[in-house]
Image (spheres, helix red, strand yellow):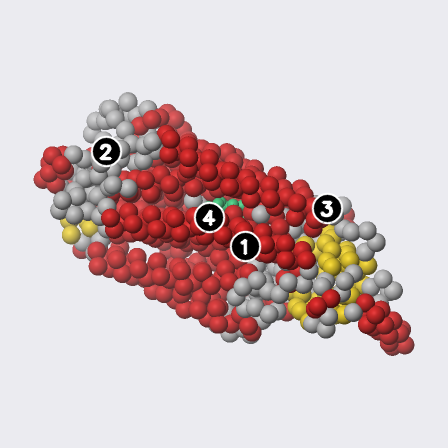
Amino acid sequence: MTSSSWLPAQLTSMAHNVDLLFYIMLGIITFFFVVVEVLLITFLIRYRRTKRNQVGVNVHGNNVLETVWTLIPALILVFMGAYSVKYVYEAQNPPAKPLVIEVIGHEWFWEFKYPNGLDTHNDLRIPAGQNVLFDIHSADVIHGFYIPEARIQQDALPGRMTQFWVNVDTKDIGKQFQVPCDQFCGTGHPIMVGKLTVMSADDFNSWMQTELQKQQTKS
Amino acid sequence: MEAVLHAPRRSFVREWVLTVDHKKIGIMYGVTALFFFLIGGLFALLVRTDLLSYRGVFDAQSYNEFFTMHATVMVFLVIIPMLMGAFANYLVPLQVGARDMAFPRMNALSYWLYFVGGIIILLSMLYGMPDSGWTSYPPYSLTSQGPGMDFWVMAIHIVGLSSILGAINIIVTVHRMRAPGMTWNRLPLFVWSTLVTAYMQLFATPALAGAVTTLLLDRHFGTAFYDTSAGGDPMMYQHLFWFYSHPAVYIMIVPAFGIISEVIPVFARKPIFGYHAIAYSSVAIGFLGFFVWAHHMFVAGMQMSAGIPFMISSLVIAVPTSVKIFNWLATMWRGAVEYTVPMMFASLGFIGSFIIGGFSGVIVAAVPLDMHLHDTYFVVAHIHYVLFGGAVMCIMAGIHFWFPKLTGRMYNEKLGYLGFWLYFIGTQVTFFPMHLVGLAGMPRRIASYAPIFQTWNQVATIGSYILGLGTLVILYNLMVSAKYGRKVGHNPWHARTLEWTVSSPPPEHNFEEIPVVTENPYRPYTPEELTASRESA
Ligand code: HEM
Ligand SMILES: [Cu+2]
Ligand SMILES: [Cu+2]
C-alpha cells in the first residue's frame, strides 16, 4: 500500500478507470457540497435575527424552484448511474483465455491454487501483462477477497463461486501489496492478509514450477 | 394549567409503570433510550480506544463483541425507539389534536416489550456477548459460541414486535384521530414523517423477524437454511436482512427530518418553504426505500450487473433527500434566524454534517466505486455522517426544542451551546478521517490494522472522546435543568403546532376541548401576534 489517506497505487487500467469515475463524481459532489455549505452559512449570517429583522418574509414556496432543484439533481444522479454502467460490464466480463487462480478463504488465511497444481497459503503471485481470473470461494464462513490496488473485491462464499479478473501493468513488476480480508469473519479477520507479488511472466512460470517441485519433494 | 395542578397524586408505580398516557410513555421511551445511548456510547469508546494502536489494545474477540454491542444498541435500542417511541409518542397525539394514541394499552405494551428487549441485550453480556456484528451474517453467526447470540435473536424479535405495534398505533392515530379541520394539508410535517416511517416499520420488520428466526432454527433445530452443504444459501439471509435494514436506515432518518422541518421555520420566523414538497418527498423516500436493499450486496455474490438497477434506485432516492435540503435552506432565506441551541443543532449541526453522508452515499451507490469501498472505513464514515451527523443531531435539536414543553423549564443555554460545539467538532474530527483511510483500503471491523493508518485512527479516537464529553455535558444540562431550570410559559418559541397551545407540561388528556384547526401550522407570527405571545408566556 502506498497511501495512508487517499486512493492507493493503481495496479491495472481498470483501477485508472475507476479512479477517473471517482474523481468525476467527487468533483460534482464537491461542487454541490460547497454550494450548500456556502448557502447555509450565508443565510445563517445574513438573515440572523436582529432588532430590525424580527420576522421573516411571508413566502410559502415556489413551484419553479421546486422543479429546478428536483430535476437538476435527478439528471445529474441518473447521469452518474448511466456513466457507471459500462464500468460494471467491463469488470464483470472476463477476457478470453485468462490464467485462472483459485482463491479459497479459510478461517483465517487465503489459499491460492495455481494452474499447475501449486497450492500456497497467503502467497499470491501474478504475472504482469496477462489476464488473470480469480475463481473465489470459501471453505467455511464468508470472507472478502479484496485487492485495494486493483479497486475490486468479491466476497468468498461457501457453496458459490464469485469471480473477478485483473491485468496488472508491467511497470509494477517486483512490487508487493497486501490482500486483506474484507468481510467480517471472526477473531482472525484483522490478520487474514495475503501478500500479492507482481512478477514478470517468465519469473512467474519458473516460480510456479520450482515451488511445485519443492512442495512435492516435501510431501 | 388547572389540569396539572389538580392532577391527583399517584404512586410511582401508578404514575409511570402502569401508565397508558402517551406523554408518559414517550418520556419513558426517551429516558430509556438515553440510558442505552450511554451504554452504546461506552462501547463506541471501547472500540475507538482499541484502535489507538495499530496492534489493537484489546484482544480481537473482545473487540468484536464491543462493535457488535455498539451497533446493536445504537440501532435497535437508541435511534429507532428514540425517534419512533419517544418523539412520535409524545408528539403525534398532541400535534394532530387527539387526547391519546388510538390504542393506549397497546402503546404501553410496545414500551415494555422494548424495555424487555433491552434488558435481554444487556443480559447477553453475561452469557457470552454476541460477536457477529449487528448484521449477524451466517454462516459466521451460526458458529458464534455461547448463548449470547441466541439472546441477541430473542431481543431482536421482541424489539421488532414492539416496533410493529408502535407503528400500528401511529398509523391508526394519524388516520383516525385528527382533530376537526386537521386536513392532510395542515398536518405538521413531523406527523407526515412519522406516518411514512410507521408504514415502513410495518412492512419491513417482518423480514427481519424471518431472517433472525431462520438463524435460530439453524443454530438449534437442525434446519439448513444457511448450510450450503445441505442446499442452503447464506445470501438469502442477506436479502432478508437488508430488505428490513435498508428501510430501517430511513426509519432512522425520516422522523429526524420531521424534527428539522418543525425547528427551522420556528427559529427562522418564516413559513416552511415548500410544505408539499417536503411532505411528499418523505412519501417518496418511504416508497423508494423498499427498492434499494441490494446496494448493500454489490460484492456479496450477485452478478455485478445485477447491481445496476439497485444502483439507479439508490441514486434516485438521493433526489427527495436533496429536495428537502433545498427547502430547508430556502426556509432560512430572508428569514430572521435566531441562534438557539435547537437551531444550531438543526442548521449547522444537521444540515452541515448530514450532506456529507448523503454525498458519500452517492459515491458508494455507484457499483464500480463500491467494488473498492465496500466494507472499508469509507462506509463507516458514511454511516456515521448520516446517523450521527444526521439522526443524532436531529434528536438533540428535538430534545432541546421540546424540553420546555416536557418540563415547563428552559435548559441552561451556555451549557447547551457547549454541548452543541463539542458535538459539531467531535463529529468532524471523529468521522471525517475515516473517509481517508477507507479510500486507502482500510477494512472495517478489524481490531488491529496496518501501521500506516495509525495517525488518522488516533485522530478519530480523540474526536470520539470529544463526543463522549459532549454527551455528558448535554445530559448533565438536561437533568439539572429539568429540576432547576428557569420556568417558561406554554409557548416560549412562539410556534404554532398544537402542542404549543396547551400548558407545559400538557394536561393529562392534552386538550380540555378538542381544538378546531383552521390553518396550516407554518404561518409565521406577525409582530403584533409576537407581542401578544410574549405577554402570555
Ligand atoms: C443519499 C442517500 C443514500 C445513499 C445513496 C446511500 C447508499 C448506501 C450504500 C450504497 C451503502 C452500502 C455501502 C457498502 O456497504 O458497500 C450504504 C450503507 C449504509 N447506509 Fe446509506 N445511503 C444513503 C443514505 C443513508 C441514510 C439516510 C442512512 C441512515 C440514516 C444510511 C445508513 C447506512 C448504513 C447504516 C449503512 C451501513 C450498513 C452496514 O453495512 O452496516 N444511508 N448506504
Ligand atoms: Cu474476514
Ligand atoms: Cu441501504
Q: Which amino acid type is shown beneath numbered disc 1?
A: Tyr
- Residue at mark 2: chain: A
Label 2 packing within 10 angstroms: few (<14), some (14-19), many (20+): some
Q: Mark 3 touching mark 1, by CB under 8 A?
A: no
**Circle 2 sits on which residue?**
A58
Q: CA distance from mark 4 to mark 2?
A: 30 Å
Q: Amino acid at mark 2?
A: Asn
Q: Secondary structure at mark 2?
A: loop
**Mark 4 close to ligand 1, CB under 8 Å:** yes
Residue drawn at x 56%, y 74% is B451
On the image, the x and y values in percent for residue B9 come to 20, 43
- Judging from the image, mark 1 belongs to the subunit labelled A
Residue mark closest to the camera, 4 vs 2: 2
Residue B466 appears in the rendering: yes
Q: Are marks 4 and 2 on the same chain?
A: no
- Disc nearest the viewer among 1 and 2: 1
Say which of marks 3 and 1 sits in front.
1
Does A132 sit left or right of B47 as displayed? right
Single out the residue that lies furthest toward the top. Answer: B180
Q: Residue at 33% across / 26% down in the picture?
A: B185
Gap in Å between the C-alphas at discs 3 and 1? 41 Å
Q: Write down the chain letter for disc 3.
A: B
Chain bearing tag 4 is B
Q: Along the horizontal axis of the image, is B3 left or right of A213?
A: left
Residue assigned mark 4: B358
Question: Mark 3 highlights which residue?
Answer: B232
Q: Which residue is mark 1?
A: A23
Observer-nearest of B7 and B169:
B169
Tell which residue pokes out farthest to the left in this image. B535
Measured in 3D between alpha carbons, the distance from the residue under mark 1 to the one under mark 2, in whole angstroms, is 42 Å
Query: Viewer-proximal residue, A56 or B470?
Result: A56
Q: Could you tell me which quadrant the N terminus of chain B lies in?
A: top left
